[in-house]
Structure formats: C-alpha cells, structure tokens
C-alpha cells in the first residue's frame, strides 16, 4: 500500500497548489463575493465533482498512457510548466490582479453554479498537471495496486483542496475587503503567490522522472 512519505508528499504538493491563484480560486472568490457564501459553497460542490472525475481517470491508469508515449508526457509537463509561469507573470506583472480582486459575475441559480464549478475545475490546467504529471510520481508499483495507491493519494489531495477552498469561500468577502484597503498587503500577496507558482513551474519542467508504468491491479 502507499507509503506515509508519499501521502505526506502529495499533501504538501496539494496544499501548495490550492494556495496559489488559479481558475478555481478566482471563480470561487468572485462567486462568493458577488453572490454570497451559499453560492460559493454550491460552486465548490461542482469543483469537487471535477476532482472526482480526475481521480477516476487516475485510478483507471491514465499515467500508463503517458508511460507508453513519453513524448506526450513530456509535452504535457512542459505545457503545464508554461501555464504556471504564465499565471506567475499575470500575478506579479505591473497592474497584475490578485485572486482576491474578484470580477463581477451575474447571479446564477444553483444548477448553473454547480455546472460552472465543475467545468472550471475540469478545464483547470493546474489540476490536470497535478493528476497527470505530479501524482504518478508518488505511486510505487512495488507497493501493490497502482489503482488503490492513486485513489488514496487522490483522496488526500481532494480532502486538502476541499478544506482550503471551503475556508476561502467562507472568508472571501472579509479577505477581499481587508486587501482592498491595504495596497502593500495586496502586493505582498501577489508576489508571494507568483513566486510559488514560478517555483512549481521550474520543478515541473526540470523533473526527469517518469510516471508509474504498472497497470492497475
């Protein structure tokens, strides 16, 4: 079964990613600020559904596909690294926007809130990179079922992401208001998040390990 070190490793990666600005954070903050916490939580349920879709794909052995086509795996990693660098630049560039400077959104019913949360997460390259490139690095075929390990690691990531995103939804209005009146804090938040994104991009681009090759047991 999966090692404690692997669980702790994916937990650290998951925490770093969920704390960096991306499509999920921007959407959840904007929705929570413009339509309230209840709308933010409904949207978060859609995000959760998206995570579960990625988890199923990981358990079915999506990493094996990339092991068979190394060039495709490399392309996905480099594309993910480029996307993270773009997010970093967009965050720290002059006139850059913080995730807590939300955009106005129309008031939507619960079904649309759920659907938009789902679609936002499914189309989120940061999450795709996590499940395609990062999570397989913590799977050890010698420790048993690759599918079971992928499920446990994925559930670890989902638990952390869901908990942090729920806190973001519940506190989005207060945090946005606090940062709006304190430009120095807002700049510091942008540069901190931009630095983390750039660091993740470099680690991803320079990683030379391959995904787990054993089929699901």
Image (cartoon, rainbow, N blue to C red):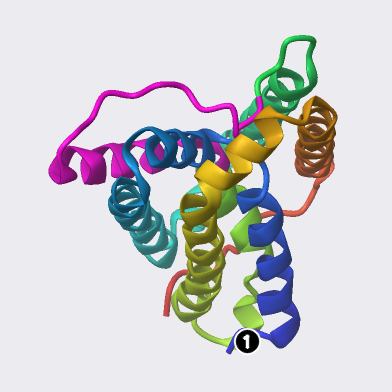
Front residue of this view, candidates 201 and 1: 201
Above or below residue 102? Residue 193 is below
Query: At x 58% / y 27%, what residue is drawn?
Result: 101
Horizontal side of 122 relative to 205 (left or right) equals: left
The image quadrant of residue 73 is top right
Q: Residue 215's spot in the image, x, y percent?
A: 46, 69
Q: Which quadrant is home to the N terminus?
A: bottom right
Q: Residue 144's spot in the image, x, y percent?
A: 55, 86
123 falls in the magenta region: yes
Query: At x 76% / y 81%, what residue is drawn?
Result: 5
The residue indicated by pointer 1 is 143
Q: Residue 96's spot in the image, x, y percent?
A: 71, 16
Q: Which quadrant is home to the C terminus?
A: bottom left
Please identify the residue farthest to the top as the structure is shown.
94
Q: Residues within 10 Å of mark 1 (few under 14, many from 20)?
A: few
Above or below residue 136? Residue 125 is above
- Describe the element under mark 1 as helix, strand or loop: helix
Front residue of this view, candidates 123 and 112: 112
Above or below residue 84? Residue 9 is below
106 falls in the magenta region: yes
Horizontal side of 66 relative to 19 (left or right) equals: left
- Residue range corresponding to the magenta coloring: 98-127
The image quadrant of residue 204 is top right
Q: Residue 104's spot in the image, x, y percent?
A: 40, 21
């Amino acid at each position: 079964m999966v090692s404690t070190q692997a669980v702790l490793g994916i937990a650290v990666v998951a925490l770093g990613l969920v704390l960096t600005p991306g499509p999920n954070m921007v959407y959840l903050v904007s929705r929570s600020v413009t339509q309230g916490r209840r709308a933010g939580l409904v949207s978060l349920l859609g995000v959760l559904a998206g995570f579960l879709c990625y988890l199923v794909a990981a358990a079915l052995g999506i990493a094996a596909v990339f092991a068979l086509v190394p060039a495709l795996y490399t392309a996905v990693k480099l594309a993910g690294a480029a996307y993270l660098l773009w997010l970093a630049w967009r965050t720290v560039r002059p006139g850059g926007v913080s995730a807590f400077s939300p955009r106005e959104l129309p008031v939507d019913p619960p079904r649309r809130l759920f659907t938009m949360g789902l679609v936002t997460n499914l189309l989120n390259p940061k999450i795709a990179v996590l499940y395609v490139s990062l999570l397989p690095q913590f799977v050890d075929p010698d420790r048993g079922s690759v599918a079971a390990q992928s499920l446990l690691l994925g559930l670890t990531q989902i638990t952390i992401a869901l908990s942090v995103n729920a806190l973001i939804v519940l506190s989005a209005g207060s945090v946005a208001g606090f940062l709006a009146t304190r430009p120095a804090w807002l700049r510091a938040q942008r540069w901190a998040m931009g630095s983390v994104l750039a660091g993740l991009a470099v680690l991803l681009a320079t990683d030379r390990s391959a995904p787990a090759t054993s089929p699901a047991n």
